[in-house]
Amino acid sequence: MEKTDDYYLRAVVAILSSKWTLPVLYGLRDGTKRYHEVNKVVPDMTQKVLTDMLHKLERHGFVERVAHPTVPPKVEYTLTDLGDSFLGALVPVVDWTKDHLHEVHKAQEMYDSNGLS
């Protein structure tokens, strides 16, 4: 059976279902980061949520985790080729958002002021 676009749209939504997925991926765009550096990029998420998100992204093949045998432990996170290719598709969406978010907000305000919500 041939898969439709709907199948792929649902698959990407399932991968990106957390509100933290995109900010964490985007935060790794400049290269390898240690845990606390990732946490600085997305400072309003808890350590547990960040840890879970990094594990999820590693499971999806978007992030590679390297633990160095040092004291204290040193763990680094890097985008994989798969994660980097996804980020390449994400950057135009971020650019579109920068250009058009004000229009979206204006449409929302108009909708809400018309009592349609």
Image (cartoon, rainbow, N blue to C red):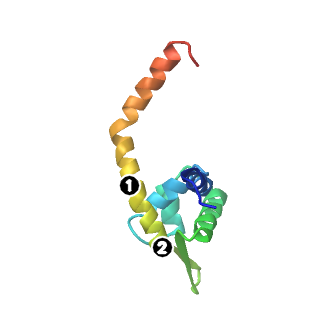
Residue 33 appears in the rendering: no
Quarter of the picture holding the C terminus: top right
Give the image location of residue 16, x and y in percent.
Answer: 57, 54
Q: Is residue 107 above or below residue 67?
A: above
Mark 2–mark 1 CB contact (< 8 Å): no
Quarter of the picture holding the N terminus: bottom right
Residue 21 appears in the rendering: yes
Local packing at callout 2 (Cα closer than 10 Å; few below 14, some 14-19, many 20+) is: some
Q: Is residue 62 above or below residue 66?
A: above
Local packing at callout 1 (Cα closer than 10 Å; few below 14, some 14-19, many 20+) is: few
Give the image location of residue 52, x and y in percent.
Answer: 65, 62
Q: Residue at x 40, y 70 (%)?
A: 31
Residue that lies at the very extreme toward the left in this rendered image:
99
The local secondary structure at tag 1 comes to: helix
The local secondary structure at tag 2 comes to: loop
For the residue pair 109 and 7, the one nearer the viewer reads as 7
Q: Amino acid at mark 1?
A: Val
Q: How many numbered dots are placed on residues in this image?
A: 2
Residue at mark 2 to residue at mark 1: CA–CA distance = 16 Å
Give the image location of residue 33, x and y in percent.
Answer: 46, 70
Q: Is residue 84 above or below residue 19?
A: below
Give the image location of residue 79, x and y in percent.
Answer: 47, 70
Residue underneath mark 2? 80
Q: Which mark is residue 39?
A: none
Q: Residue at x 58, y 87 (%)?
A: 69
Tell me which label, 2 or 1, sits earlier in the chain: 2
Q: Which mark is residue 91?
A: 1
Q: Amino acid at mark 2?
A: Thr
Q: Residue at x 67, y 59 (%)?
A: 48
